[in-house]
């Protein structure tokens, strides 16, 4: 029985894709909090932000996070803002292993611009505004992200290396 693993980091850093691969390696269940919220509400994240507001989204995110903290053998992709609200970061660290997928703002901007996923916080930004906004927003969020037990560079991430780090931190 192993503690939950929480992947954190800015939107577009690869939490979901890395999480799926890591879960397979660790023979664990993969859970994406945003997907869980969409299933629970029947709305997209963008719709929730637009119709119900960010505060409502953060409450939903928090309640799912709390329910996951007591589970074992799971790899969780959190939303980019999850560690930055309430005492979510402390909660994740107390109940599991937190991994920050750290990426440069320019890398994040490129990935977000190339993605089909609608991102409420950046959807109105131009291609030129995106890297500037991300750099500023990332500086604010890194105060929380940098509290993770494991910090790994996202651009050159090798799933073998991440698996090794996780197994050695249990």
Image (spheres, rainbow, N blue to C red):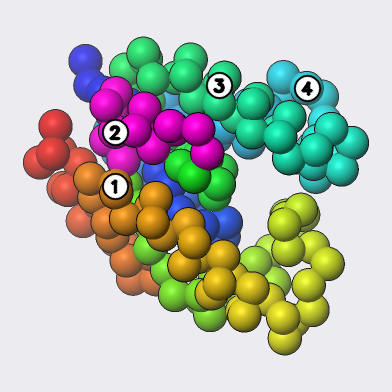
Is 147 or 5 nearer to us in this picture? Answer: 147
Q: Distance between the Cα atoms at labels 2 and 4?
A: 27 Å
Q: Quadrant of the C terminus?
A: top left
Label 4, on which residue?
41
Q: Earlier in the sequence, mark 4 or mark 3?
A: 4
- Relative image position of residue 112 (x, y in whole percent): 65, 67
Instruction: Name the residue: 43% across, 47% down.
Output: 8
The stretch of residues the image draws in magenta is: 85-98
Badge 2 element: helix
Q: Nearer the viewer, mark 1 or mark 4?
A: 1
Q: Distance between the Cα atoms at labels 4 and 3?
A: 12 Å
- Relative image position of residue 41 (x, y in whole percent): 78, 22
| 63 vs 136: above or below | above
Label 3, on which residue?
64
Is 78 one of the magenta-colored residues?
Answer: no
Q: Earlier in the sequence, mark 2 or mark 4?
A: 4
Badge 4 element: helix
Q: Which mark is residue 148?
A: 1
Q: Distance between the Cα atoms at labels 2 and 3?
A: 16 Å
**Could you tell me if the residues under marks 4 and 3 are in contact, i.e. CB atoms within 8 Å?**
no
Q: Earlier in the sequence, mark 3 or mark 1?
A: 3
Residue farthest toward the left in the current orientation of the protein: 168
Badge 1 element: loop
**Could you tell me if the residues under marks 1 and 4 are in contact, i.e. CB atoms within 8 Å?**
no
Q: Earlier in the sequence, mark 1 or mark 4?
A: 4
Q: Residues within 10 Å of mark 1 (few under 14, many from 20)?
A: many
Q: Earlier in the sequence, mark 1 or mark 2?
A: 2
Q: Distance between the Cα atoms at labels 1 and 2?
A: 7 Å
Quadrant hosting residue 34: top right
What is the total number of numbered labels drawn onto the structure image? Answer: 4
């Amino acid at each position: 029985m192993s503690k939950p693993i929480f992947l954190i980091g800015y939107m577009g850093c690869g939490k979901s894709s890395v999480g799926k691969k890591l879960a397979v390696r660790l023979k664990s269940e993969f859970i994406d909090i945003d997907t869980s919220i969409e299933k629970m509400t029947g709305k997209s994240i963008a719709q929730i932000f637009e119709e119900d507001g960010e505060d409502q989204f953060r409450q939903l995110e928090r309640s799912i996070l709390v329910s996951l903290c007591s589970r074992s053998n799971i790899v969780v992709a959190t939303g980019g803002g999850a560690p930055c609200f309430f005492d979510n970061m402390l909660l994740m660290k107390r109940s599991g292993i937190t991994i920050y997928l750290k990426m440069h703002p320019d890398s994040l901007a490129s990935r977000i611009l190339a993605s089909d996923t609608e991102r409420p916080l950046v959807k109105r930004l131009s291609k030129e505004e995106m890297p500037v906004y991300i750099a500023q927003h990332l500086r604010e969020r890194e105060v929380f992200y940098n509290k993770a037990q494991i910090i790994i560079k996202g651009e050159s991430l090798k799933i073998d290396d991440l698996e090794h780090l996780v197994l050695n931190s249990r």
